[in-house]
Image (cartoon, helix red, strand yellow):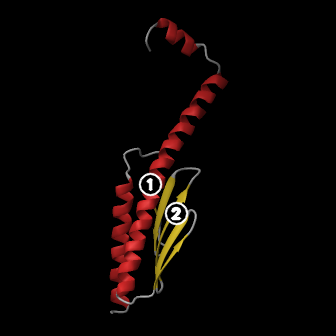
Amino acid sequence: MGNWRDELVEVVKSKEEREAEEAERQRKRLEEALAVADEAMKQALEGLRFAKEQLASKKQPAKLKEGEGEHVLSLNDLSLSVSLSRDSAVLEVNFNEGRPREFDFAKDRHLSPKDVEDYVGRRAVELARTAQKNAPW
């Protein structure tokens, strides 16, 4: 607070005014988080495309399904998916239908698109290793 006048203005606000200000702050935070999450989703898709290209170069039946809010890389019975919830700015990475890894950009401001790209890349390596182990090529 700057001075007693500013403090008084703040103190006399109604509950509705406080809630409206908080809602506006949340909306702005979500907007900022979505911008970062969208960039992370783009980088994750680039990683999935690279993985598909590498697998295809070895004549593996890798498929990449690109959707509006979800991208899925599949190879035989293995899959790696990335999805973005636009209402909460949460990006989920799911490997083989296991427990998803969530990146909550609204809550964790220190997250970067590079973090997601690295995680997706590591899961793609895991997918390739598992596929190689199941059916060597």
Count residues near mark 1 (Cα–Cα under 10 Å), then give few for <14, some for 14-19, many for 20+. some
Residue topped by disc 1: 39
Image quadrant assignment for residue 51? bottom left
Earlier-in-chain disc, 2 versus 1: 1
In the foreground, 63 or 115: 63
12 shown above or below 119: above
Give how far across and how far down residue 60 sits, in percent: 40, 88
Give how far across and how far down residue 83 sits, in percent: 52, 63
Left or right: where 20 falls relative to 110: right
Left or right: where 112 falls relative to 87: left
Give how far across and how far down residue 135 sits, in percent: 37, 92
* Amino acid, disc 2: Ser
Tell me the SS state at disc 2.
Answer: strand
Q: Which residue is most to the top? A: 4
- Is residue 70 in view from this perspective? yes
Name the image quarter holding the C terminus: bottom left
37 shown above or below 69: above
In front: label 2 or label 1: 1
In the foreground, 70 or 97: 70
Tell me the SS state at disc 1.
Answer: helix
Give how far across and how far down residue 136 sits, in percent: 33, 92
Name the image quarter holding the N terminus: top left
- The residue at 45%/87% (across/down) is 61
Residue topped by disc 2: 83
- The residue at 56%/68% (across/down) is 67
46 shown above or below 37: below
- The residue at 39%/84% (across/down) is 56
Cα separation, mark 2 vs mark 1, equals: 13 Å
- Is residue 105 in view from this perspective? no
Q: Are marks 2 and 1 in contact (CB under 8 Å)?
A: no
* Amino acid, disc 1: Glu
Count residues near mark 2 (Cα–Cα under 10 Å), then give few for <14, some for 14-19, many for 20+. some
